Image (cartoon, grey):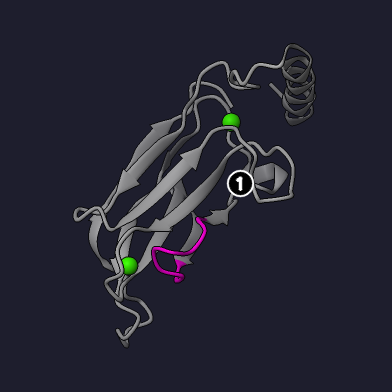
Amino acid sequence: MGVTATRTFSALALAATAVVGTASQASAEYDDSKTVWTTDRCGSLEFVDYGEGEPGGGPDDDYMLVRDHCDDGFHVRGDVWVGWSWYGVAYQRGGPSAAPLYWDPFAEEEDELVAGSRFGFPVCLVDPTAPDPGYLGFNCTNAEVTMVDG
Ligand SMILES: [Ca+2]
Ligand SMILES: [Ca+2]
């Protein structure tokens, strides 16, 4: 299914939802959402298959939320890979009182997730005092999703 078709369907489904006043799932036939936690559960990285997206940004399809659950001085790092391509990294530096960090590595049309897209998203803690710029972090856990639909 093409991008335009998906977006159009999303808009129609949203309109239908508004009319009947239910909070049922809007566009995704299958909800591929998944959350992965660091081994100590102090950091999490959530893939949201369909939702509100950035506050004030309107409905959005496919994005990540990075959360820090512990006031331990460590930050939380999330990465996204699609196949062998690295889609980037995001850091939650705000601590547990901060709003979840919204991150959309799939925003460009060529980066859009489609049915069958297989992607991985590891989450790690990072020590902000670590000197090594190539430092990946610790207490990492990886998650993988193969999209049932876009
Ligand atoms: Ca989606
Ligand atoms: Ca922390």
Question: Is residue 75 covered in magenta?
Answer: no
Q: Report whether residue 114 is seen.
A: yes
From the viewer's side, name the closer residue of 8 and 66.
Answer: 66
Magenta stretch, residue numbers: 92-100
The secondary element bearing badge 1 is classed as loop
In the image, residue 74 above or below residue 110: below
Question: Is residue 95 covered in magenta?
Answer: yes
The N terminus lies in quadrant: top right
Residue for point 76% across, 20% down: 18
Q: Is residue 150 left or right of residue 6?
A: left
The C terminus lies in quadrant: top right
Residue for point 61% across, 46% down: 106
Q: Report x, y in % for residue 30.
A: 51, 18
Q: Report whether residue 85 is seen.
A: no
Q: Mark 1 points at which residue?
A: 106
Ligand 2 location (quadrant): bottom left
